[in-house]
Image (cartoon, grey):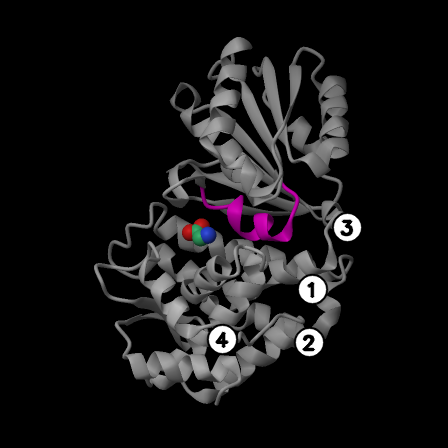
């Protein structure tokens, strides 16, 4: 069992290991009277097992199983309203607890419900996808989507603890594990050599769920995220680049997801986005070509896509409405070296086109 402390505002621990349910339950305070166990549809068995564990270790606690709609359909005002009604009917107080079991949508919406109910009750996250373990469930971003866009309503709200049980990844389709690894290596690219060396030494075998390097890479990715959010919890970037560096590869990646009607996996889209950002960094003269080549080899070793043949003008339009844009200027996170993220402000149209040509196979 490995533990990472996240020290942003209220500090909490992320535990990475296997078969964590008994330890998670042991960690729950004796003062809790009720638990709302919010679970994604595919996690019903895991939620039921956790409920049984809770009744054995804490027979005084009333546990409610609350199914959460699948995927992004969980992140709606309607679902949040129904959850508030439920918590009201059962008189949940500040000494009660919510637990989320599922991917990023489940942890995002349950986190938001916890942040808003009684202005904040405790929440524990048990992420069940790699993407949620290394990104969504760590760092305190919670939220829902509205007709105006994704994640536009939310709160920065830290969980009480996060439990990344690697045995839960066995039910994850291989493509989702692979795509989740894009966020793991992103943490490597923005922080230095450690994760890259793990991938280079292990090759595709790092995706084997029983491999020690897989655990090492996940733990390291969470440590990187913890360091970034500790320095800039609310993405206010005072005195430096701050949390924005976590968006390496995301400006183009989000545009690809949008253009593909969210049929592309997030990790696949940011893999291509990272290749675009690396090429752009080279073109504007802040890094050498070795960086681009090494990054591409790592992504390809993991079976992640490095090219995309969509319409660049449509992607440009979508990028210019990206919420990370300051004023009317396009802004990218680039790399001057691994571990040295840098902002690229207002790159020229020809530099953007050149970088896109490198990843669209047109060069
Ligand atoms: N997913 C980016 C962040 O947590 O800031």
Do the residues under discs 4 and 3 have CB atoms within 8 angstroms? no
Residue 244 rendering spot, x and y as whole percentages: 36, 58
* Relative to 182, residue 68 above or below: above
Q: Which residue is mark 3?
A: 170
Do the residues under discs 1 and 4 have CB atoms within 8 angstroms? no
Element type where label 3 sits in the image: helix
Mark identifier at residue 275:
4
Q: Is residue 129 magenta?
A: yes
Query: Disc 4 and disc 2: Cα gap in Å?
Result: 21 Å
Q: Residue drawn 52% across and 21% down?
A: 82
Element type where label 2 sits in the image: helix
Mark 2 sits near ligand 1, with its Cβ under 8 Å away? no
Mark 1 sits near ligand 1, with its Cβ under 8 Å away? no
Provide the residue span drawn in magenta. Answer: 127-140
Residue 52 seen in this snapshot? yes
State which tag comes first along the sequence, 1 or 3.
Answer: 3
Do the residues under discs 2 and 3 have CB atoms within 8 angstroms? no
């Amino acid at each position: 069992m490995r533990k990472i402390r996240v020290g942003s505002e209220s500090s909490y621990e992320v535990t990475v290991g296997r078969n964590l349910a008994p330890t998670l339950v042991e960690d729950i305070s004796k003062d809790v009277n009720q638990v709302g166990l919010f679970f994604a549809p595919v996690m019903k068995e895991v939620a039921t097992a956790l409920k049984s564990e809770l009744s054995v270790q804490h027979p005084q606690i009333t546990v409610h199983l609350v199914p959460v709609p699948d995927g992004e359909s969980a992140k709606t005002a309607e679902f949040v309203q129904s959850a508030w009604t439920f918590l009201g009917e059962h008189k949940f107080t500040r000494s009660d607890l919510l637990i989320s079991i599922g991917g990023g949508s489940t942890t995002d919406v349950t986190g938001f419900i916890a942040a808003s109910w009684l202005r904040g009750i405790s929440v524990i996250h048990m992420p069940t996808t790699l993407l949620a373990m290394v990104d969504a469930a760590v760092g305190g971003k919670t939220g829902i989507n509205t007709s105006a866009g994704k994640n536009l309503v939310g709160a920065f709200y830290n969980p009480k603890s996060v439990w990344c049980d690697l045995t839960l990844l066995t039910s994850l389709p291989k493509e989702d594990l692979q795509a989740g690894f894009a966020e793991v290596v992103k943490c490597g690219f923005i922080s230095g050599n450690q994760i890259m060396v793990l991938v280079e030494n292990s090759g595709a075998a790092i995706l084997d769920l029983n491999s020690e390097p897989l655990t090492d890479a996940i733990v390291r990715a969470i440590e990187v995220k913890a360091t970034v959010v500790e320095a800039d919890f609310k993405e206010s970037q005072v005195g430096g680049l701050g949390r924005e560096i976590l968006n390496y590869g995301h400006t183009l990646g989000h545009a690809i997801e949008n253009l593909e009607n969210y049929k592309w996996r997030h990790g696949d889209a940011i893999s291509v986005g990272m290749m675009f950002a690396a090429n752009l960094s080279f073109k504007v003269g802040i890094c050498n070509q070795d960086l681009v080549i090494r990054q591409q080899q790592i992504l390809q070793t993991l079976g992640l896509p490095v090219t995309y043949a969509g319409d660049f003008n449509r992607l440009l339009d979508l990028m210019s409405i990206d919420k990370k844009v300051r004023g009317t200027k396009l802004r990218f996170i680039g790399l001057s070296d691994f571990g040295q993220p840098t902002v690229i402000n207002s790159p020229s149209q020809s530099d953007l086109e050149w970088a896109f040509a490198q990843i669209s196979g047109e060069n």
